[in-house]
Amino acid sequence: MRGTEYVRDWPILKADVRDLQFSEFGKDLDLLAGGVPCQPWSQGGRHGGQDDRRNLFPEMIRAVRETRPKAVLIENVKGLLRQNFSSYLGYILLSLTYPELEIRQDESWERHLGRLERHHSSGHQKGLEYRPCIRLLNAADFGVPQKRERVFIVAFRSDITAHWCFPEATHFAESLAVAKWQTGEYWERHRVSRKARPEPSPREIAMAQALDLFATNGFPWRTVRDSLSGLPMPSERGSAEWNNHVLIRGARSYVGHTGSPLDEPSKTLKAGDHGVPGGENTLVLPNGSVRYFTVREAARIQCFPDEYYFPGPWTEAMRQLGNAVPVRLAEIVARSIREHILRNHAKEKRRSAA
């Protein structure tokens, strides 16, 4: 598998994160990355938020406090930005800013928030401190064949020279509209005859006519058809050449859950609280029928390499994929952080040599 040389010696621990002593991993790490459980904040869940036992943001802050990384990367669902969670989101950001200002025994998070706010406004900060940035990113805007909006929080330690910002979008819906309905390049590339092409929506026509500049200034959104290119049609027997490419019967559409069109980025793949969501992780075929994405197809939509194998039953593999961060998006953000840290290292070396 590509990239295995980077992770071959990584220790993998099967444990409750609340039982870990993060200081055992050392201090002054380059990067601490965490996908804090999203269920408390998900629009499809119980909306328990900070009161949900799966809220592990306090453990993420503890990990920061104990490892003192140069940079922190946190990812979560768009639901975290909802108005009813706004106070707790402010609490998360201030806790990350001053991770050494710990919550006291029997102190509520609201009282701790007040103490953090007073500390922040006092102007007399000292000790471990971070500068967090937060942004809602759509994976489709970065070349992922999926409309998947996720909240990213990136924070650099205060002694790291901070001239960083989130990467800019590289792929655009407008460019896709131009490639389909103005130049026809999209259909020609996929060898789709004029007779077999769907009718454009009024919105697509408007984008293609008004914003043809995107044809040269940005890449098109990648579609389901783009991501599945080269894969054979799945069968119930599977494929000797393609692992995890087995057709699962029984897909149906539901009101509001009608599957992903072939010539758009897919809808957000979801894990589901009670198994794979019936109408969500499905593909709408040109004849109007629907079928489930195979695990291999879902992995491609999440940008996992084809060599990556998902063991276990279909439902468990799809749950893992529905919970995953698209590989390409994670790589783009992480690479940007890495480049910033390396530049900072180079500056420190020059100062030491001067």
Image (cartoon, rainbow, N blue to C red):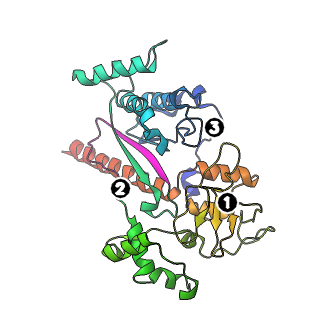
* Mark 2 → mark 1, Cα distance in angstroms: 36 Å
Which residue of the protein is positioned furthest toward the top in this rendering? 106
Determine whether label 1 and label 3 are within 8 Å by CB.
Answer: no
Residue 83 percent coordinates (x, y): 42, 36
Q: Earlier in the sequence, mark 3 or mark 2?
A: 3
Pointer 3: what residue? 13
Q: Secondary structure at mark 3?
A: loop
Q: Is residue 307 visible?
A: no
Instruction: Name the kind of residue labelled 2 in the image.
Output: Pro
Q: Is residue 321 visible?
A: yes
Q: Residues within 10 Å of mark 2 (few under 14, many from 20)?
A: few
Q: Is residue 276 above or below residue 303?
A: above
Residue for badge 1: 253
Foreground residue, 212 or 111?
212
| Magenta region | 148-167
Asked whether, in this view, residue 204 is left or right of residue 346, the answer is right
Q: Amino acid at mark 3?
A: Leu
